[in-house]
Amino acid sequence: MLLEPSILPLLILALTIPEQTDRTEDERNTIAVFSEAKLGVVHIKVRQQESTEFGAHQHSESTGSGFLIDHHGHILTNYHVIGSANRIEVYLPDGGMAVARLIGTAPTLDVAVLLVDLYEAGAHEPLRLGDSETVVIGQKVIAVGHPLALHNTLTVGVVSAVRRSLPGGPAELQEALLQTDAAINPGSSGGPLLDSSGEVIGIATALVPEAQNLGFAVPIS
């Protein structure tokens, strides 16, 4: 039997592509957690206007991350992401943008709560909050955020230590922070640190620029 010439390229391609092996259980878990989390993680853009000594206005812009905690549009993020913002823009999982209202802060805990209008039901899904009191060193953690404005970036690591302190940090967070080797970069602040069940156990808050694999999160509890 002769094969049609048009079939030959497809046959050659099929013979040269290696058979896909099954993903490991850990890979399937990471994929499942990310698939759920990406529906609740948001990108935050903050615009600030400051007056100079000559009466002129200077404009600055910074970015961060956050995540939905309910179906009403409440978003949890870091206080230092918001700062003295004049305008807070939230880019939602469906690609839409909403101007957020700042409705609550706890500066000493580096926590802020925003509120946005959610127009499309089902296009967003709040993240589930876990219990950081049960976290143990060595357990797997997953961070999702928008470092350097790269939307929905996933990094994976472990809990490296618990009850850590940062020099110069507020008293309320001394011997309280979670340490992780999951990559946290500028723009990741305010994003969720998740356990393997997809529950939020911390809020990514800081990194040590002069060191590698040293990130910190405010425990969710």
Image (cartoon, rainbow, N blue to C red):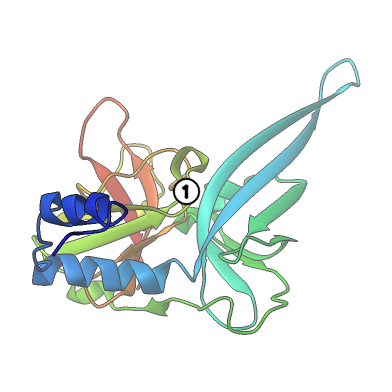
Given the current orientation, which residue lies at the most extreme right position?
A: 55
Tell which of 81 and 7 is nearer to you: 7
Q: Is residue 40 left or right of residue 21?
A: right
Q: Which quadrant of the figure has residue 183? A: top left
Report if residue 62 is visible in the image. Answer: yes
Q: Which residue is the site of mark 1?
A: 146
Q: Position of residue 19 (x, y in %)?
A: 10, 61
**For residue 97, side relative to residue 50 (left or right):** left
Residue 220 visible here? no
Residue at x 89%, y 21% (from the top left corner): 56
* Amino acid marked by disc 1: His
Against 81, residue 211 (above or below) is above
Q: Position of residue 94 (x, y in %)?
A: 60, 66
Badge 1: residue crowd in 10 Å (few <14, some 14–19, many ≥20): many
Please tell me in which quadrant of the rendered image residue 193 appears: bottom left
Is 148 left or right of 7, judged from the image as shown? right
Return the x and y of residue 151 as percentages of the image width and height: 49, 50
> For the point 25% across and 49% down, which residue is it?
9
Residue drawn at point x = 45 percent, y = 58 percent: 109
- The relative height of residue 157 versus residue 24 in the rendered view (above or below) is above
Residue 177 screen position, x and y as percent: 28, 55
